[in-house]
Amino acid sequence: MLTAFGAFGFCKAHAASFALPTYQSAWLKRHHTAAFYAGVLTHDPGMYPKRVILDDARHFGVPILPLDVNRSDADWRAEPVPAGGPAGIRVALSEVRGISDAEIGRIAGARPYRSLPDFWRRARVSRPIAERLVLAGAFDALHEGVPRRDLLCRVGALDRVTARPAHVPEGQLPLGREDGDGDLTGVEASLAEEIPAGGLPPMTPAEVVEAELDILGMDVSRHVMTFYAGLLAGLGAVRAADLPGRPDKSEVLVAGVKVATQTPAVRSGQRVIFATLDDATGPVDLTFFESVQDRCAATVFGSWLLVARGGSAAPATAPSRSPRTPAGI
């Protein structure tokens, strides 16, 4: 009896254990959308990277609020937007590469900040973390109109003027001296602010997204595939949102960011590669059988951006689909 039940019991238990949280998640996503996404991004989102969850939030009308030293917390959180529209989700400080819990605690505990020198003095983060915060846009609201490259130079100036040498000659004050209230001296603060705004070219949108991917691991300001829209249109690539209308087994060209790769065991014993691309309109599922793997497996596993040509397959879902439902190819 136990052996017979074991043949299908796991499937029943698996389905039952997923049914309740699936229903709860669907209800939260519908009625408390921003809070739902904030929770998913704070905790483990599963097999997909966080940038896919972030893009899904965009498709459901949730504003993505950038990193901000005066507003971001340790975790993602829902935040009302000034215009009175739907609540947005604020990028968490914990997403900054290399930041420590102690640094997050000091940043949150000493707020609000009036300026970059004020932040440098009271938050006491390392120079690499301060530079990453600048490049990720965490000071854009505090220094509106000042290019990030200029702020990056100011971080370097602050680091130099507040460095405490190992030995200071008798009768000479260290350059990094603070006054009795713990503030930077007027000389030091002015040295940091003397770098004029606009002295360096602002970062291009592509450089901004590149910095976000490097520092946060996700493209916050815009989807990376938007930079290739003209190229892909010229190649005749079909977007994920348009795949459901294509006739079954028609040959199509698709492109996107690879967000998942799997090689599960299949009944036939063959090795099958499953990959998922995200092209900013939805996910596209790709299937690579053994007959083509000798010439494409290295590319599939070793590349982040992919272009693939193949025969489209009807999705195993009802005809009525949301734009985020995976389409097969």
Image: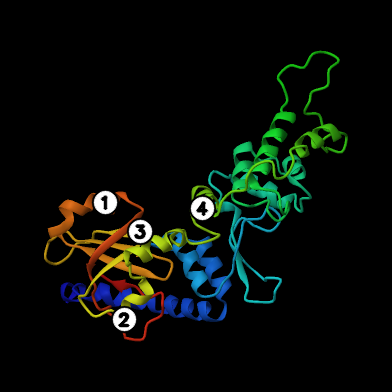
**To which residue does mark 4 refer?**
206
Residue 149: x and y in percent read 63, 43
Residue 236: x and y in percent read 32, 67
Residue 299 numbered tag: 1
Residue 269 numbered tag: none
Which quarter of the rendered picture does the C terminus lie within?
Answer: bottom left
**To which residue does mark 3 refer?**
258
Q: Residues within 10 Å of mark 1 (few under 14, many from 20)?
A: few
Q: Residues within 10 Å of mark 3 (few under 14, many from 20)?
A: many
The residues tagged by marks 1 and 3 sit, at their Cα atoms, a distance apart of 11 Å
Q: Amino acid at mark 4?
A: Ala
Asked if the residue at tag 1 contacts the one at tag 4, i.e. Cβ–Cβ closer than 8 Å, the answer is no
Front position in the image: 16 or 159? 159
Asked if the residue at tag 3 contacts the one at tag 4, i.e. Cβ–Cβ closer than 8 Å, the answer is no
Front position in the image: 63 or 267? 63
- Of labels 4 and 1, earlier in sequence is 4
The residues tagged by marks 4 and 3 sit, at their Cα atoms, a distance apart of 19 Å
Q: Nearer the viewer, mark 2 or mark 1?
A: 2
**To which residue does mark 2 refer?**
245
